[in-house]
Image: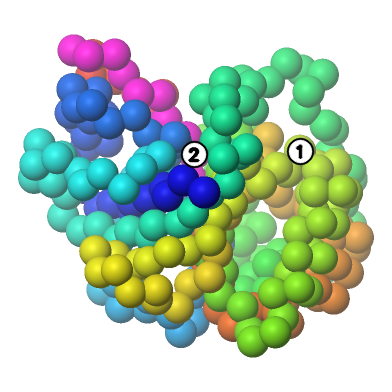
Amino acid sequence: MPACTLHLLSLSVTIPDFLSALSTTSLTPLTIGRVVRWIVLPTSISIDPLIARNIHWDILMILPNTDILPASLQKLILHQWQVTAGVPSRLLHDFASKNRRLLNPQPEDTPPLTGSLNNYRTTASAQALELSPPLMEWIKTYRDQEGRGAVSMLNLLAFKPGLKGEYLKYGAEFAKSIGSKRGGIAKIMGTVIHEGDIEERGEWDEVAVAHYPSIEHFADMLASEDYQEVNHRHRVGSLRDTFILCTTELDLPAPGKNESKL
């Protein structure tokens, strides 16, 4: 199972400048995306490096190896947090072309919304992956200002003892129906090997990156009764901690070009 490294970066330069510098290195990321918003915050694990210092995160980059970032990039980074995970080879096989198809779908490849957003219940908090008024308001603003393109949700997961099996049931239902019928696909999944630069196991168990055709498709899922039934039956109670970070993927510019698809 190949080891991949997830890098969460806060930059001292603009994103286009970082992408331009990245294009001059030998690194070939699996994905690179702009950090948009926390959807679910961690409550007990990695609090200090992720949220306690009020760091503005800019970039999520996933490399298909454990290579150290070169000095030419390190000097552009203010803060970084990383996790290394073993990812099944079947997910990495032909990943670039599969990901291009997800990010640039044909009209017939994108499922319609199910109508859940026409009548839904809100909750005070989005921490259980439900629609809160602040989250819904942000989704509407993001849709209107940023467009209707694909989003990628980074998930870090820590399971309660003996309850990973319950989460796997949630994952099976996501792939079978509640996620897939809204275009949701877990395109990267892996078992955490270690966190940060140290070789210790850490407290996170798994990492996943879920693709949605648009932020509205993600909201449609959260608003639906079928999703929330499975969410509360299998997912919520199985997790000791989790976080979800919304990102939008970027194009890596050709050498010498200082532009990106933001």
Amino acid on which the number 1 mark rests in the picture: Gly
Judge by depth and name the residue closer to the eye, 120 or 249.
Answer: 249
Residue 261 point in image, percent of width and height = 41, 24
Crowd tier of the residue under label 2, counting other residues whose Cα lies within 10 Å: few below 14, some 14–19, many 20 or above: many
Labels 1 and 2: the sequence-earlier one: 1
Decide whether residue 229 is among the magenta residues: no
Query: What residue is shown at x 29% (from left), y 13% (from top)?
Result: 254
Residue 214 point in image, percent of width and height = 66, 37
Q: Quadrant of residue 255?
A: top left
Q: Quadrant of residue 108?
A: top right
> Could you tell me which secondary element the residue under label 2 belongs to?
strand
Q: Say if mark 1 contacts mark 2, CB within 8 Å.
A: no
Vertical side of 71 occupied by 38: above or below = below
For residue 183, which numbered disc appears in the image? Answer: 1
Highlighted magenta segment, given as a residue range:
246-256
For residue 248, which numbered disc appears in the image? Answer: 2
Query: What residue is shown at x 18% (from left), y 22% (from top)?
Result: 24
